[in-house]
Image (cartoon, rainbow, N blue to C red):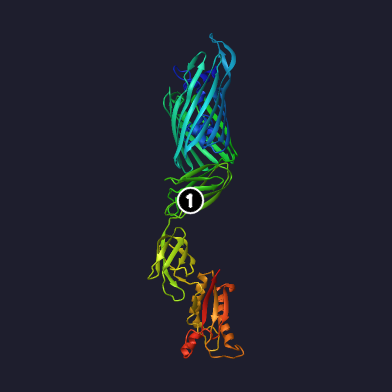
Amino acid sequence: MSSLAGVVVFLSLVGFGQPGTSVMPVLVIDQGPRFAAMGGAGIGAVDDASAIYWNPAGLGRVLANRIGLAHHEWFAGIKDEVVHASLPFGQGALGLGLVYSGEPRIEFWDANNLPGDTFRTWNGTISAGYGLAVARDYYVGAAAKGFYQSLYTSGGYGGAVDLGFACRPRPFLTLGAVARNLGIAMYGRGTEHMPIEAGVGGSLVFGPVNTLLDVILPLENAVSLRLGAEYRPVPEFAVRLGYRAGPEDLSTLGAVSGLTAGLGVHVGAFSLDYALTPYGKLGTAHRIGLQAALLHRGSGSVRLKVVDGSNMLPLSADVTATGVSSYKGHTGITGELRLTRLPAGDLVIYTNRTDYLPRVDSMYIVGDHEQSAVIALSPLTYGAITGIVADAATRKTIGGSIAYQGTVQGSTQADSALGSYVLRSLPAGQYSLTASGPTEDYLTQTCTLKVEAGRITNRDFYLVKRRQTIVLQGVNFETGKADLLPEFDSVLTRAGEILRVNPGITVELAGHTDPREISTSQYPSNWELSQARAEAVRQYLITKWGIAPERLTAHGYADTQPIAPNNSAEGMARNRRTEFRITGQQ
C-alpha cells in the first residue's frame, strides 16, 4: 500500500489527479541530469541533444552528432529511462527524444479494502524536432511528440507540439522562450487537458560561472521560478546548484525540497552528469546521464571576436573567410561573429575596418566542436613623405609625379618650379614610391620606404635620362695617374646612388686624358691611361656599392673627346675626367 500511496501523492504534487488539471505529468518532469541539477532552468542555455525537451530552438546551436542516455531513480520504485539524440542537418539539427517512465510493482486493493495482485503503470513519449539558425545567433525550433500512458484498467494517448525561440544578443547572454505540450490527450472516449505551459529563460555567463533563470507559466497551475548556477573551475569539471518553485507543491513538501545539486565531468567527447533532487518525506530522486559528441564533418564552428589592439574594446569590422568554407559578413557592434557548419581543414580570415590596418589570419578547424579566436586590429596612425624630383646630371629640380602604394595608394604631382612634393596623412606602414619625370625622356625610379606615425620621411629622387652622359665632376686625376683619391668619394657616392636607385640601367664608364702624351712602363700611351681611369671607377662601384659587374663597362678614349680647350692648365684638368654614360635599361 505504501508504494501506491507514494505514487498517488507524487502525482498530486505535480498537478495530476486534481479536478480540472492536466494529464501526463511525465511531460513536465525535467529530462536529463545537467539542467535538472540547476533547478530545471534550461530554456535559454540548452545547446545539446536534450534541447528536444527543454527548447527545440536549442537544436540550432548543436554542432555535432550527439547522443545522451539518462537514468532517473525516483522514490516508490519509479524509474525513467531517457534517450536524446541530435544530428546536424542543413542549416540546423534534427533531434530525437525517447522517454520511458514506469513503476513495476504497485499493490492493488479492491473496494472492500482487500489486497490483490500487483500491477504496473508506465508512460512513454517519443519526440522528433528540428532547430535552425534564422540569422546570426538567432534560432527557432519545433518538435512533435506522441505519448501513451498505461494505468491499471485504462490508458490514454495523444500528441502535442513544442515551439521554441533562442538568441544570443551578447557574448555573455543567451535568451530563450518556449511553448510546450500544445496538443490533446484521449482517455477512454473523452479528451483530457494537456500540461500546456509557456516559459522564458536566460543564461548569463561571468567567467567560469553560468547563471540561469527560467519562468514557467502553466496553463492550469501556478507560475513557478527555476534558478540555477554552474561553476566550472576547469573545463573538465562542473559543480551545479539550483532552486525550483514548481511544479511540485513546496508548501506540502517543504521549502528545502526546492533545492537541487549536481556534478559534471567532461572528458574529450564524453560528459558524465549527476543530479540530486530532494522531495521531502517522499524521498530523493537521483539522475545520472552520459552524453557523447560524435565526429561529424562540417560540425565545427568558430567564434571570432574583433577588438582594437590598443585597448581591446570590440570593433565592428568586415570579415571574409576562405578555405574550408566561404563567408562574407560583418561583426556588428559586439565585435563577435560565429561561423558554423565548418568541416575540418584550414580557414583563412581577412579582417578589414576603416582607419585600421587590415589583417589576414589562418587557423585549423578541428571540425567537431566550437573554437574561438580574438583578432586584434592595429589603429592606423599617420605620417608624411616629402622630397624633390631633380635631374641626376644637373642636380636641378624638374618636377614630375609621384605614385605611391601601400596601406593606401594614389599619386601626386611635384611642383613644376620647385620640384618638391608632399604626401600627407599616410597611414603608417611600408610604401612603394615611383617617381616619373616631366617628360618621357626620364627613366622612372622606384623605392620602398617605411612611414612612421607622427614623422615626416624625406625622399629625394634624382632621375636620369635615356642615353644621358653625366660628368663625374671632381674626379679629375693627377697627370699620368689613375689613382682614386679620397676627395673623389663624394662624387663617386653620387654615381653609386644613381645605380642603386635605378637598378635597371646599364652604364659605360668613359675615361679621358688631356693631350699630353705619356709613355711609361705602366701606361705606354694615353689609351691605356684612360682605360685604367675608367676601370678604377668601375671597380670602386663594384666593390664599395655592390653593383653587379655586368651592369658596368669601362672604356678609355684618351684625348679624343675633350670638353674644354687644352690651352690652359684648368682646361686640361677638366679633360682628365671619367664620364658616366647610360647605355640602356634592362
**Residue 451 or 170: which is nearer the viewer?**
451
Q: Which residue occupies 43% across, 23% down?
A: 219
Is residue 66 among the parts visible in the rendering? yes
Residue 371, above or below 79: below
Whole-percent x and y of residue 298? 57, 41
Dividing the image into 4 quarters, which one contains the N terminus? top right
Q: Quadrant of residue 417?
A: bottom left
Is 32 left or right of 457, judged from the image as shown? right
Residue 370, above or below 376: above
Q: Residue furthest left?
A: 417
Label 1 crowd (10 A; few <14 / some 14-19 / many >=20): many
Say what amino acid the circle numbered 1 marks.
Thr
Whole-percent x and y of residue 398? 42, 71
Dividing the image into 4 quarters, which one contains the C terminus? bottom right
**Residue 178 or 237: which is nearer the viewer?**
178
Q: Residue furthest right?
A: 521
Q: Which residue is mark 1?
A: 351
Is residue 55 among the parts visible in the rendering? no
Looking at the rendered structure, the number of numbered marks drawn on it comes to 1
Whole-percent x and y of residue 223? 41, 27
Indicate the secondary structure of the residue bearing disc 1: strand
